[in-house]
Amino acid sequence: MNIESLEAKKRENALKAKEILSSEEGSVEEAQKFLSENEEISAKINVLKAADEQILPVINEVKSVENTSDIILPMSASSYKSLPFSGDSGYEKAKMGYAFGMFALSTRGNKKAIKWLSENTSYKAVNEGTNSAGGFLVPDELVAELIFLREQYGVVRQNAAIRTMSSDTLWIPKNSASTTAYWVGESVAITQSQPTFDRVQVLAKKLGILTAVTSEVNEDSIIEIGTALAQDMAWKFAQEEDRVCMIGAAANATDGNIDGFITANLAVASNVGTVAGATGSAANYNAITLANFRSMVGKLPLYADTQDAKWYMSKAFFNDVVCNRLDALSGNAALDLMNFQNGRPTLYGYPIVFSQHLASTAAGTNNAPLCALANLKTGTVLGDRRSVQISVSEHYLYNTDELAFKAVERFGFVCHDPGSSTAAGSIIALKRTT
């Protein structure tokens, strides 16, 4: 068992002992058995920690192994748990950073790295060609990890309804009108009514990134280089996905011709689900009131008012506007609306999700979006057409002696319930007035 599992076992034993002592029929002897077991567990943890401290800080030789859990990793064991990769233990997270670093080394012709990747990943199967012919492909195991990181960083991906696309176009049925219930008199025929169904169309778009990594990759910093590489590519994808899926415009090719969910809301003339806040002048950015936010809550329809309904705003707007309004309340009234002392703030009981793509300065144009209260599960669809594909070449940036990493994905996004002039939808937006 690893340290994390042993610590969990200690907590479980302590809770059992406490439960026994809290019971009228519980005995001290029975509770003491669990506490005695914890003493043995603590001893095991201390030995494991001591062993971790003796792991060599630098790899002298990359071992050829069938089980990658035998790898000696070139960094302090105490740093494992801070890595962003998936995995139940810190060591498993570090292995993924190690694998990314080994891939970067392999592009420079490092024989040990190539050998290790060939034996422990799908590297050999996908890289039988040459680098000059178009670049090495990242092994599937590492691509899956990038997808994990992308979803970890992306605000929209964490909250939207995700659908797999088997072609470039995805059609999703939507009930746009229901049947009608009638009061019926004796011996009177019931009036017939029919539900109405529409189809939501999701079109796949291509998104690509190109990033450079210095060629001075060495085994002493292999995990750090691998972690930085994976984080950068995943973060760039997540950042651009969030931008277009929030405030992108279908008329702009630079937005992938995608309407973001806030853009879709504001595009509806006289939308019941749009709240007008401050005027367009910079001086009135902070003129937003709690009544504006309360009005947004009141407009959110019941079918969208679930645990998936959340606020979307920039951190600056949260501190400059929301916190100022709550500070003015003073006393305990502020805590009734929001627990703003922790890292997961709420407003009127709804979680706040930060996105720096939304308004973050006082200056702005008329009718510009400020924030939104939205349920992306009921109001939007994000379609995945192609998972991330990554390749690397040392020839593209030959003159600067850098490695060029190219990543491409295809996805589609549509907001199908932005609201109308007669009914609010899953998206409630706050904007500046004209």
Image: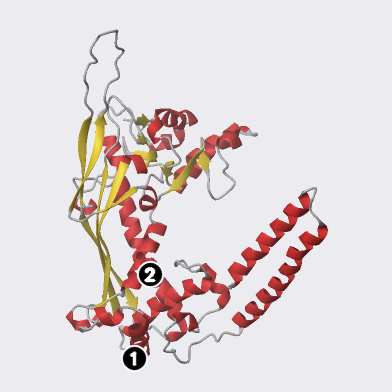
- Contact? badges 1 and 2 (CB < 8 Å): no
**Element on which disc 2 rests:** helix
Identify residue type, mark 1. Answer: Lys
Q: Quadrant of residue 45?
A: bottom right
**Residue linked to disc 1:** 111
**How far apart are labels 1 and 2 at the CA level?**
22 Å
The C terminus: image quadrant: top left
The residue positioned 49% from the left and 69% from the top of the image is: 83
Tell me which numbered mark, 1 or 2, is placed earlier along the sequence. Answer: 1
Q: Quadrant of residue 414?
A: top left
263 is higher (above) or lower (below) than 188: below
431 is higher (above) or lower (below) than 59: above
Left or right, 88 with reference to 111: right
> In front here: 344 or 279?
344
- How many residues crowd around disc 2 within 10 Å: few (fewer than 14), some, or many (20 or more)? many
- Residue 275: image location, x then y, percent: 37, 30
- How many residues crowd around disc 1 within 10 Å: few (fewer than 14), some, or many (20 or more)? few
The residue positioned 49% from the left and 31% from the top of the image is: 290
**Residue linked to disc 2:** 230
Q: Quadrant of residue 110?
A: bottom left
Left or right, 291 with reference to 110: right
